[in-house]
Image: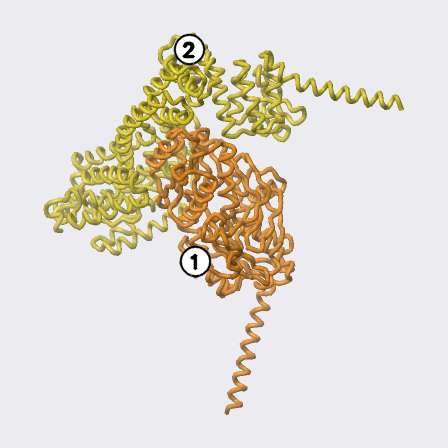
Amino acid sequence: MNFKAKLGGALLAAVLSTTALHGAFAADDTIKIGVLHSLSGTMAISETTLKDVMLMLVDQQNKKGGVLGKKLEAVVVDPASDWPLFAEKARQLVSQDKVAAVFGCWTSSSRKSVLPVFEELNSILFYPVQYEGEESSRNIFYTGAAPNQQAIPAVDYLAKEEGVKRWVLAGTDYVYPQTTNKILKAYLMSKGVAESDIMINYTPFGHSDWQTIVSDIKKFGSAGKKTAVVSTINGDANVPFYKELGNQGIKAEDIPVVAFSVGEEELAGLDTKPLVGHLAAWNYFQSVDADVNAEFIKEWKTFTKNEKRVTNDPMEAAYIGFNAWVKAVEAAGTTDTDKVLDSIIGVSVPNLSGGTSTVMPNHHITKPVLIGEIQADGQFEIVQETPAVVGDEWSDYLPDSKNLISDWRKPMSCGNFNVASGKCGGKGS
Amino acid sequence: MTRKIAFRLLQSLCILLCLTCSFSAPSLAQSGSDPKPLIDALAKADFSETEVLLGKLAATGDTRLVPALEAFNAGDLYFRKADSLVFIGEAAGSSYELIDPLTGASAGQAPKNAVTKIKINNTLRRAIRSALGGLTLLSPDRSVRLQAADALLRSPSPENLDLVETALAKESDAEVKARMEEARAVSLLPSDRSLDEKRAAIQTIKSLGGRNALGILNTVAGTIDPSLKPDLDAAVSAIQSEQQLWDMAQNVWYGLSLGSVLLLAGIGLAITFGVMGIINMAHGEMVMLGAYSTFVVQDVIRDHMPSLFNWSLAIALPVAFLVTGAVGFVIERGIIRFLYGRPLETLLATWGVSLILQQTIRSIFGPTNQEVGNPSWMSGSFPVGGMTITWNRMWIIVFSLTIFFALLALMKKSSYGLSMRAVTQNRRMASSMGIKTPWVDALTFALGSGIAGIAGVALSQIDNVSPNLGQSYIIDSFMVVVFGGVGNLWGTLVGALSLGVLNKFLEPSVGAVLGKILVLVLIILFIQKRPRGLFALKGRAVEA
């Protein structure tokens, strides 16, 4: 009886394992990757583009022969701008669809929502949007800009080139603007700017009545010192903000606005003639003069069958993330998460501004910082380009995080190593 | 060997000669004879060198430079890669029409890759503004001189002083003269003129008033002679106290303007929800459809008859009304009429409709914002005392009041309005009197939707046109209608305007985020006290 039961169990296990093997064989001719971007709801406006880019990149890679001799297959899901749904969809992609890696998320809230899922199931997420930093996960690669790759160089540019002495930090009321503004305020004060010369202002999501705030900015700017606005205003609220600026006659020569969330896509819904000269800081602009960029733009317009489609910075970040993953998988010879995590560090791939970007041990990448001025045709003219900067995950300007570093190489393998205490752990663990 | 040395010598002599040539060219131009080499030097200069060159160009006083500088400011100045000569370029298909920067003569065409745009940044734009101001100060055209004086007023610099004084001596027009006096005063303060002159300048700036004057006075406050400090402080506080009054007025205006937007958003709902009692969650999408109608109308106009662009909004109004009215009619006949008397089901059904409409628009037009242009009469602003009033906000106030009164007249004076009121007050009685109540319902819902569509035309001018447009207005609309009193148009008007003003008075002190929350809390408290809103309907309808 006992033996029989054992035999039965062994048989059952054998049957199970062959079906499992069979399943593995069936999936063997393709490698699946997940695309986790909202295609409906408020964030669809930004994220749909990234889904299209991923499909284009997969298509191109397959034309080149795929990865490890297998075709790539993109599994697209729609988390509908709903943060808990992001976690659910991420779980579905990893455990049900068995994707090798996921490319997705836009807002920090959605990233925070999926982070535990990727750590629990040990899969990989490539996150392509500029963010506030103060995070480093073993399973996430941050291919967008950290604050030191966008915000701080922009502020430096204004202080040096435009002689700005007085700062308005205007943002939408959520985690990215608040953390960025906290870092910026600490940075400015470390440079000797008085607290009375910094005005911080928050508005709700989708704020559309900017009359009071624009006139407050004017008032703040009449104190006799050169004033600039640093805008972390997000998404749809930008269009009415810029319209109000234009209508109230705030010229870039008088009070320039530098934005971190306004790119070619956002300007597509605007008449930019009154905005010429206002600035944006990114790691890529469509107007970058490089052969690789011209090629990318051409392919993008062909792929979307739309001559008017523009390219933007998160698209470049997605491009870098995808190519880095492909290269790491080819170096590792497998899509196994642990092996890819080892092989991807140090991988260098071309970026669209004509240089290369390298994946660093802190899971951030190197990229140049570009400052551009808005032109009448909705494009940016690059007025400054820095050499490649390493993304700094833990800001050096916040007391909580200035002693933390992240290094996911063995033997450290730690996302929040405290150099003062010499221990792994602390804030953000 | 000797020949080789001689050759070398000759070579270096040549180089030396060339060098002196290129060095002497700008110095020659500085004497005022020919600005051409200065302009051509722009081709190879970086930003800071360009700034120096602009200063030299301005110093030539050569009015022939005006078109070139204007082109530079607009980003239309190019240099030819082959010979580094600078031209004004006008895009003509895939190539540029090159124009000589000084003579304005055509210099033929060049393909786009044969020329390079000369880059410009904000610092250079300021330098150009000041240079242009100086160069056009003596123009025979009165409005050009006025503009020039304005430009100098915005870029105070002691270097402008001589220029302005020369122009002042020749000026006869009173208004231009006054403006030039102000321009002289702002440039005089940072200069090394006598204290008496500066004291007079402070008075001139004080009477100029406004934010700009305040900025100018504050700029020099740190460096000015101590004996002038009391005058300066007095002037600053005088301007400030005047500005404070204007700020109040400005705030009221902002409040009315926000109120008019709320009124626009809510007025359609005042009919579908207020009069008919349908909890219409798809109301915001009607506003969105109106905005997209505007986009389509503008797109057609841009492609086929660009001359009509300034009329595009007027054309879009009836189109939006008909489109959204028709959609509303279909929704009422197709869905809502089966759900009268079942508010919860209506709420869910209309919410479903709103999602369907959003996704439909997203599939047709894409998820990104669409550009809806502002006609020229809706762009910019004009000053009223110390206030700035933007044209688009003013027209929206006028527009929303017009719609309100038109709707009021329709409800109170027309026979259709009479039957509509009869149906809402007592459906069975109205039916017995021979009124086709189902038709009245359908038409009323279509009217409410159509009005929401018209509101969308106006809102497309201040907000972005995307599939999410409606969602941002739906809560505000319900808030206005409930606060004003369900079923009462006047309540909607008063409710919208008072909420707008309240919001704008809270915003400066507590911020936009908290301001919005406080308004909601206040409304909740108010509804506790007066459940039927500001203007409650009395009579049998209420009990029904």
Could you tell me how far apart the alpha carbons at marks 1 and 2 are, in whole angstroms? 67 Å
Residue on which the image places disc 1: A113
- Residue A51 appears in view: yes
User: At label 2, which amino acid type do we have?
Assistant: Leu
Label 1 with label 2: CB-CB less than 8 Å? no
Q: Which mark is residue B302?
A: none
User: At label 1, which amino acid type do we have?
Assistant: Ser
Q: Position of residue B138 (x, y in %)?
A: 46, 11
**Farthest residue, direction front:** B227
The colour applied to the residues of chain A in this rendering is: orange
Residue on which the image places disc 2: B168
**Farthest residue, direction left:** B539
Which residue is drawn at the image coordinates 35% and 32% (left, top)? Answer: A219
Graded by Cα atoms within 10 Å as few (under 14), some (14 to 19) or many (20 or more), the crowding at tag 2 reads many
Choose between A332 and B379: the one closer to the eye: A332
Looking at the rendered structure, the secondary structure element under dot 1 is helix
**Farthest residue, direction right:** B1
Choose between A313 and A250: the one closer to the eye: A250
Looking at the rendered structure, the secondary structure element under dot 2 is helix
Q: Position of residue A319 (x, y in %)?
A: 56, 49
Choose between A88 and B111: the one closer to the eye: A88
Q: Where is residue B286 in the image (x, y as percent from the top left)?
A: 32, 43
Residue at mark 1: chain: A
Choose between A36 and A40: the one closer to the eye: A36
The colour applied to the residues of chain B in this rendering is: yellow
Query: From the viewer's perspective, is the residue at label 1 or at label 2 nearer?
Result: 2
Q: Where is residue A76 in the image (x, y as percent from the top left)?
A: 49, 56
Q: In this view, does A139 lie above or below A281?
A: below
Residue at mark 2: chain: B
Q: In this view, does A141 lie above or below A310?
A: below
User: What's the coloring here?
Assistant: by chain
